[in-house]
Structure formats: structure tokens, C-alpha cells
Image (tube, coloured by chain):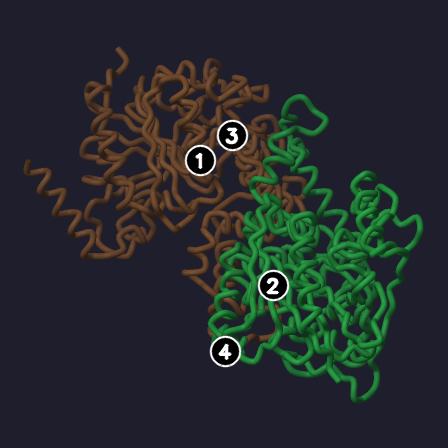
Chain colours: A brown, B green
Amino acid sequence: MPRVVMTAAKRTDRKEIGDVAMGLGADAGSAGIVRTKHVTFDQPSQELALEGGGTLAPFTVAFETYGKLSERKDNAILVTHALSGDAHVAGRHSANDQRPGWWDMMIGPGKGLDTDKYFVISSNVIGGCSGSTGPASENPATGRPYGTDFPIITIADMVNAQAMLLDHLGVEKLLAAVGGSMGGMQVLEWAVSHPGRVHLCLPLATAARQPTQAIAFNEVGRQAIMADPDWRGGHYYDGKPPAKGLSVARMVGHITYLSDEAMQEKFGRRLRDIHDYSFTFSADFEVESYLRHQGLSFTNRFDANTYLYITRALDYFDLTRRHGSLVQAFRDVTARFLVLAFSSDWLHPPYQLKEIVSALRATHKHVSYYEVESHYGHDAFLLEREKMEGIIGAFLASGARTFVPAS
Amino acid sequence: MPRVVMTAAKRTDRKEIGDVAMGLGADAGSAGIVRTKHVTFDQPSQELALEGGGTLAPFTVAFETYGKLSERKDNAILVTHALSGDAHVAGRHSANDQRPGWWDMMIGPGKGLDTDKYFVISSNVIGGCSGSTGPASENPATGRPYGTDFPIITIADMVNAQAMLLDHLGVEKLLAAVGGSMGGMQVLEWAVSHPGRVHLCLPLATAARQPTQAIAFNEVGRQAIMADPDWRGGHYYDGKPPAKGLSVARMVGHITYLSDEAMQEKFGRRLRDIHDYSFTFSADFEVESYLRHQGLSFTNRFDANTYLYITRALDYFDLTRRHGSLVQAFRDVTARFLVLAFSSDWLHPPYQLKEIVSALRATHKHVSYYEVESHYGHDAFLLEREKMEGIIGAFLASGARTFVPAS
């Protein structure tokens, strides 16, 4: 009981101090100071067999954990990240760290993924550029960075690497897997490929197969990167990275994460620091300046080759491919689902989430569906704390009661 | 009476022979063999005063006409083009020409814009690259192409140049101005800036001010072009053009012209000439191959600097800017309006057309609104002949009866 009161107090604090999620306030409800850990799988038995053929070996997975694994090992939740995410999903890396993890609003004591109850695990996907092995990593065959000699990886490969991380952490079966966008695809893949290892699945703002329009936008991003002469066929690590191409890729991606309405509201046609048009090609409009900034700042933290590999993994994702149909793909699923769609998400509109729900229902699985009313577009899953927290928290708490961890 | 019968017969022919609009069949209903003409305004009194300051002089306008101007000069219709259009709106340039004008489906004997009745005029906008003066034209000050020394032009500037073309053709007052997308913006500008010179206005798939999301996509295109080292600050006419940048710009633009549904239907996740993923960055998906082709073929017919200038003109378009509000902007309008929206157009969704309609109604103008049910997206105005032809034809015929040409 006291804990509940404390939790409520924490939430109130959080509201009073304002924008904790932006790293501007005190840290009530924070997962605290965390650090990214690394595990390298380098034993002969630890090769990662890839869906496209061949193996990845050795390989490293960067990960973080929050909260404590219970003795019964029945409280582990895996959080999977989207295209530009990483293992740092909650807390801060130092006391002065201005930027908490990317889903800090949802993870911490008393939050939706309550670290007083749950052991939360997050890892950077393979192919990534934030600590896990990817195209910028050293190719053991040459001693130089892989570049485009890195193998094409898929969502299933990412999930298989996560499964090895769980083995390493001694987690046989997850209470839950949670993720939005590409993270949601990983959650679906967990349910389908490792049905015995996950009890609850929460795919948010995602699809069971990458839709055509999303492939199209990704292809624009890839072409922008590959058109940059600094890309040099992907072997640029000894020189300048293809920053201009990556910046254009990020700009176009970013537009797809926001709704028409949110852009209109956030920027409208407002000019930036000027009273009238400049009649030049400068960034007259706030939205131009914002996008240029988003593009540029992305190049400081992200690798262009990883952008190519991860968008390819997204575009290749199609649960019907190996199974004929979605209903077939879900046949052996044992997990219970909470599927969340966001009303103004036009990258993965609600109809794509409903397709998942229909197929699960057709094969008599436990599934709840909820459409969150939001004008934030695809990014809503990163922003709508108030609207998601209760639903997700209740689903986890209720699901925990039916969970039988592996023996 | 015989003419009506003949027209009906023609339409039947057209249906039987199939895809005339794609240039694959015989030419029943065609505007026939046409040629692009040019008029150069080079007199001291013919300088074009630009909205952004300064003048353009001398300048040339490329244009085509179809049908015959009546003696009363009461049958002239101006058709205005969109971003990538030109003066060649109907007919063919030679007997073997495989590609008729861009709105050939709507213009010709017996068609919606019936050239047995109307004198149809179309011109390439200034700033364009299809015959009218633009950044690739010779700068009289240097004897070399303008490049980015070309002045920023606006929709109002384009319309003022068209007004001078009408003077040249002896057309004091238009029966109608018709156009989609950027063409629709020109139609709106005609109504507002030259209220005495146009009787009927038909803006299709457009907006009274460029919306934020459209500015954002255009800015991606501009950044892609300017990131191409071949762009060289816009002075590339003595060397290689920035084809890769322009290609990326076209790809992203193209996605915005199609609906999610149309892309899904047209391409889905179909692979191209392969049975399984290649596990490379090749164009595995048909949609990738299609976009690459669209991008590449565009670079063969379009100038990258024109892309910059015209998207800037689009983004600067805002009828409320000079007038405070849309209602104020429409105050002196005398034209009667037919406003057409297309249900799946997400670049200019119906709400943007309804904004125009509401403002016109608020100031008691004649306005009809029609939302065409279509899954083609923004491109619908270039494709939905059957659904538009009757509505447009009837509006023109009825409007012609109330038209009093200028004395």
C-alpha cells in the first residue's frame, strides 16, 4: 500500500516539474543512472545463422536493463526499438545527461513498465550502429569495417540475436515483448518464431508486412544515401561519411512520422526570424529549418549504412511470406496480444493493425485491440504517455497473473 | 444536331480502341497535330515586374492552342499546368508522336474541353524548362544561362506572364481558367488578381495556400538536388546536370501523387523478375524499380533548377498573405467557381478545397463543389476522365451562357 501512495506522489511531482521526458527537470520516476552493457557471442556454437543465408560471427549485442529479475524469473519484459532507436530506452547515462532513454516516459518506478515490478531489457538490433555489431563494425575477414560486405539482416535475425541475449541473461521466457514501428515487427516475430518464449505481445503502430508506401519512402532514403559520392559503395569509414544523403533520408522519414495535422499545428506556414519571404532558397519556413536540423543532427549519431540495412530489414518484413497467410503464420502463437493503433498514423494506419487483430482472432488467439486517439501521427507511440500508460500497465498486470515461467 | 451525333460516335470509337490517352491507339477525339509556339516579350513596356522585386526582361512564353477563337472572342479557356507539366496539354506533335499532351483525355473534339466549341490555350510557366524563360535560359546580363541568378518567381508572376500571352492572342477575357495542383493555384490567382478577365474558375486538387506537409516534401526535394555535387550552386549548364539529386526529388514527389491504396493495388509487395528476395540492395520490389525509373526518366526531360524554382513558387503560394484572410482575398472576385476535390488525394485533401469553397461562400460568390470519389490520390485529376468530364463539360456549357466578353 505505501508503495502505491509513493507512486502517486511521484507522478504528481512529475507533472509539477514539467518536461522530465525532455530531460529538463528533476528525475522523479526515473529508472536512474544506467549504463549500456555488451555481450559478445564468439563461441563456435554461437554463430548467428541468418535468414538470407550465411552466418554472423562473432557478434556483439549492446543492451541495458532496468529493475531486477525476480527469483522466479517471471517479470522480464523486452522492449524493442524502431529504426533510429538504440538500447538506451530509459534512465540516464550520467547525472548530467540531458537526454534520457527514448521511452523514458514509459519505463521507471511507477510508470507503465514499472521497474519496481518488472525487469526491463532493451538491446540495440544487430545491423545497428549503437553498440551491436553492424556495418561499421570490424569485419574479422579483413580487419576493416564491414561496410556493404555486412550481410543483409532481417527482423527474424534481430530477434534471434535477442533470444541469445536472453539466454545470456538467464531469461527463458519473457513476460512480455513490447515495441512500436519496427519494434512492433520484432514483437510479432517473437510471437511467431519463438512461441514458447513470450507470454504477452504488445505491437504498437506497426504492420505484419511492410506496406508498399513505406517501402517506397525507404527506397527514397536509400537512393539519397547511395547517390551521395561520399558513400563510396558503402566503404567510407576511412573518410567522410555520406552525411548529405543520410540527412535527406532522415528528412523524408521524419515527415512520415508526423501527421499532416500535427505539422500544420506545430509549424503552419510560420516564417523563421523573418517578417517576409526572403525570395531565396534559404529556410524561410520554420518547417524547412526544423527538417534541415533533424537531418543534420541525425548524421551526428547515426550510420548511413545502418540506415540502408535497417530499412531493408523493414521492407523485407512480411509474416505471410514463410507461412502463406497471416492466419497460418499465427497458428502456433501462444502469446496474448494487446495491439495498439494510433488514429492519425499514416505510415501504419489502424487498418494495418486491424489486419493483425483479425488474423489472430481467426485462429482463436487472445487479442485486445485499442485505437489511441492522437493527432501526433506515427510518432504518437513515443509521445502519448497518458493515453497508453493505463492500458499497457493494466494489460501487463493482468497478464502477469496468468504467466507460467518456463521450468 | 449532326454534330452531336458525330461526337457521340467519336466517344464510342474512343472506348472501342482503348487506351488513346496512353498514345497506343488511333486518334479519334484528338486535338490533332499541334505545335508549340513561342512569343517573346522584349519591348520596354513588356517587362515582367516580379512579386519578389525586380523585373524579368526579355522573356519568352511557350504556348499551344487548340480549336478556334470565336469572332466574339467568348470561347477562350486557359489550361494551367502542374509542377512537371508544360504547354503541350493536348494532341500530338507529329503523326508518330507516341505521347499526347498531358491532359489529352480532356481536350479535343467532343471531349470535356470540347475544341469544336472552345479555344483552348496552354502555356509553360515562366521559370519552367519547356520553352518559357527559366533558369536554363540565357541571362542577357552575362550571355550564359541564369542558373540560380534567375529571380525567384511566384504563382502571381506566372499568371501575369499568362495575362501578357492573352494580350498577344487578342483575348481580353477568358471564358474559363482550369487547372489542377499548381495549375489550380494559378486559377485561384487569376480570380483574385485579374477579376475582370476570367468568367469561370475551375481549381482542381489544390489549395489556397501551400500546406505545411507539402512544403516539407518540397524541401526534401530541394535538399536532394542541392546536395548533389553536380548541382554546383546551380551553375551546371556547362557540365553534368545534378541528375541523381533530381531523381530523388522526383521519387519523393511521385509518392505524394499516389494514394496508399493505389500503390498497394498497383504494386503491393510484388517482386520484380525474381522469385525470392535477393538479399542485396537491388530493386527487388516492383515499387522500387518503378520509382527508380520515374526518377531517372524525369531527369531526361526536366531541369533541376526549374524544380527548385517551381517548388519555391508553390511553397510561397498563400492567398491570405497579401489580403489578411481568404475571405478578404476573394472579396473582388467576379468569377463563378467549380471546385473539384478527389477523395484519396492526401497532398491536397478535400478539406483544403473546402476551405476555398467556404471562403467563397462567405463572400457570396457563385461556387459549386464536387468531391470525386477516386482511389488514385492526387494524380486523380490527370486520370479520372469519366468522373470529371460530365461535370466540367456541363459547368462550362452553362457558364458560357452567362458570359459577357469584354467590349
Depth check: A66 or A370 in front? Answer: A370
Q: Is residue A123 above or below residue B37?
A: above
The residue that disc 2 covers is: B338
| Closer to the camera in the image, A295 or B83 | B83
Determine the secondary structure under disc 1. loop
Q: Residues within 10 Å of mark 2 (few under 14, many from 20)?
A: many
Identified by mark 4, the residue type is Gln
Tell me, for residue A209, which label it has, or none: 3
Mark closer to the observer (4, 2) = 2
Q: Mark 1, chain letter?
A: A
Q: Residue at x 86, y 48 (%)?
A: B28
Quadrant position of residue B68:
bottom right
Between disc 3 and disc 4, the foreground one is 4
Residue A217 lies left or right of residue A388; in this view the side is right
Q: Which mark is residue B328?
A: 4
Q: Can you tell which of label 1 and label 4 is closer to the viewer?
A: 4
Residue that extends furthest to the right in the rendered view of this protein? B95
- In the displayed image of the protein, which residue is found farthest to the top? A407
Which residue position holds label 1?
A206
State which quadrant residue B313 falls in. Answer: bottom right
